[in-house]
Amino acid sequence: MSAYSLAGIAFVLFSLAAAGFLTCGSLVRMLMFLELMLNAANIALVALSPGTVSQAYALMLFAIAAAEAGVGLALIITLASVFKTLEAENIKELKG
Amino acid sequence: MIINAAIYLFGGLAALATLLMIFQREPVKAAMLMLAALLSTAGLYLALSAQLLAALQIILYAGAIMTLFIVALTATPAAWRDKPSKSRFIKMLGLAAAAVILTELLKVSALLKQTVFSPEFSETGTLDLARALFGQFTFQFELLSLVILASIVGAVTLAAGKRSS
């Protein structure tokens, strides 16, 4: 098995998540696909450099992903309660 | 051999779950498919001999983050999210864009073909990881607690602002 096939798995996951991010309209789903993109990056990090340093970085990325999900969902719920929708295309005004 | 098969199996499962998630209309079912993708990733970490990461993947991603998503989905009224989903054509267009991204990524990483990776199962990763985290990366590791603290303060401020208004 070459490192290329391992990278391929991570790249396939990343691009599928990117496709989902580009096509879905719901804010919560977009955040879900964002998490999956981060997850694919994590896989690439762990798979391409077998050792403790890459795993340490992956662990730090876990914490960052958790923080991102927390703030992102708080933002989305606040936005949704103001605009009464979870669809990104219905949110057009940034003022106020 | 078994490890190679496990890597392909779990990678394929994660990819399949992500693909099904794109075409799933129900948000909660999509969340369950995301859970499947995250659990497959945990299996992938196990196959790559990253046992601690596999455990953390289950606890953090599949446990904590998924719970957050489910709570966010159930806390918002259904009328806000029950919109007709986008046409299949747009989804195919998105998949085509993703195929372009994938081709570019594979092209860029063509040099990796020369690197041979022979996965072997090892058990001592966790101790070395702890030594790295509390030795070489102590500052970064402690800085992460600040990041999490900032995110907690941010989330609480957003939620509290919403309640007072």
Image (spheres, coloured by chain):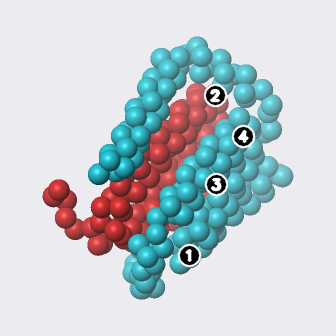
Chain colours: A red, B cyan
Mark 3, mark 2: which one is toward the viewer? Answer: 3
Residue B131 found in image quarter: top right
Nearer the N terminus, badge 3 or badge 4? 3
**Alpha carbon of mark 3 to alpha carbon of mark 2: how far?**
22 Å
**Disc number placed over residue A52 in the picture, else none:** 2
Q: Chain of mark 2?
A: A
**Alpha carbon of mark 4 to alpha carbon of mark 1: how far?**
28 Å
Q: Residues within 10 Å of mark 3 (few under 14, many from 20)?
A: many
**Three-letter code for the amino acid on which mark 1 is drawn:** Glu
**Three-letter code for the amino acid on which mark 4 is drawn:** Ala
The answer to whether residue A56 shows anywhere in this view is: yes
Closer-to-camera residue (A52/A4): A52
**Disc number placed over residue B55 in the picture, else none:** 4
**Do marks 3 and 4 share a subunit?**
yes
**SS category of the residue bearing label 3:** helix
Residue at 77% x, 54% y is B6
Nearer the N terminus, badge 1 or badge 3? 1
Q: Residues within 10 Å of mark 4 (few under 14, many from 20)?
A: some
**Alpha carbon of mark 1 to alpha carbon of mark 3: how far?**
18 Å
**Three-letter code for the amino acid on which mark 3 is drawn:** Leu
Q: Which residue is mark 3?
A: B38
Q: Position of residue B133 (x, y in %)?
A: 59, 21
Q: Chain of mark 4?
A: B
Measured along the vertical axis of the image, is residue B64 above or below residue B133? below
**Three-letter code for the amino acid on which mark 2 is drawn:** Thr
Q: Which residue is mark 1?
A: B26
